[in-house]
Image (cartoon, rainbow, N blue to C red):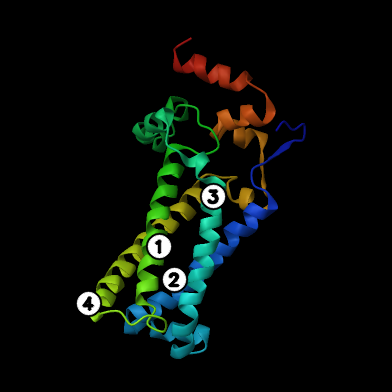
Amino acid sequence: MKSKTRDIQRYTAGERVNHWVVAISFVLLALSGLAFFHPSFFFMTNLFGGGPWTRILHPYIGLVMSVGFVLMFFRFWQLNLIRKNDVEWLKNVPALVNGEHEKMPPVDKYNGGQKVLFWMLVLCMAGLLVTGVLMWRAWWNLPVNVVRAAALLHALSAFGLIGLIIAHIYAAIWTKGTIRAMTRGTVTRAWARFHHPLWYRRMTGDTTDLDKQTSRKHGA
């Protein structure tokens, strides 16, 4: 889709609502889950009306996040398939950290790091959903060893997810101009051209900067 406006739409209103439903659910689940993980965090159950209400609400909020994430998965999975240039991008991450952006291969809507993050989130979400269902004793009466194993895997998946989300937030703050994509839905042309040149070309039809970048990469 080509656009003559100054900014480029990166996410639709529906995609942004989907994202924030999952994000808010994640925060609520992290707080309520940590409250049960260790006694020193139990005071956080007051945010949900006390211990019994926290225990009741936690799995239902988990279902909301799971449904929201499934919708996100079907919206974005094709855009997150890892391709040859993504492997090259991942190999050159040290150059990116050092600010040598010109050494990075041009990427489409998502770079290799974002794609790896996406699939790791999928794994953690799947682990949380499956183990959470097994632990939901209000509905199931499974053997205690199954519940204990599920509880351990649930905690591991939860800490994995928390770590990934922290990395996601850090990257969004570190890359200036990214957060507005999920608040306003748009990014500037300069941002798109610099960070995602293949996507920029597809959205605008402008190949000038991409041609220059290719020439620099080959020493022209």
Looking at marks 3 and 2 on the same chain, the residue that comes earlier in the sequence is marked by: 2
Looking at marks 4 and 2 on the same chain, the residue that comes earlier in the sequence is marked by: 2
Q: Amino acid at mark 1?
A: Ile
Q: Residue at x 54, y 35 (%)?
A: 195
Please tell me whether mark 3 or mark 2 is closer to you in this view. 3
Q: Which secondary structure, mark 3?
A: helix
Please tell me whether mark 4 or mark 2 is closer to you in this view. 4
Looking at marks 1 and 4 on the same chain, the residue that comes earlier in the sequence is marked by: 4
Disc 4 crowd rating (10 Å Cα; few below 14, some 14-19, many 20+) is: few
Looking at marks 4 and 3 on the same chain, the residue that comes earlier in the sequence is marked by: 3
Residue 151: x and y, percent?
30, 73
Mark 1–mark 3 CB contact (< 8 Å): no
Looking at marks 1 and 2 on the same chain, the residue that comes earlier in the sequence is marked by: 2
Q: Which residue is mark 1?
A: 162
Q: Which residue is mark 3?
A: 74
Mark 4–mark 3 CB contact (< 8 Å): no
Q: Which residue is mark 4?
A: 145
Residue 49: x and y, percent?
52, 88
Residue 27: x and y, percent?
50, 69
The residues bearing labels 1 and 4 have C-alpha atoms spaced at a distance of 26 Å
Q: Which residue is mark 2?
A: 30
Residue 90: x and y, percent?
37, 35
Please tell me whether mark 1 or mark 4 is closer to you in this view. 4
Q: Amino acid at mark 4?
A: Asn
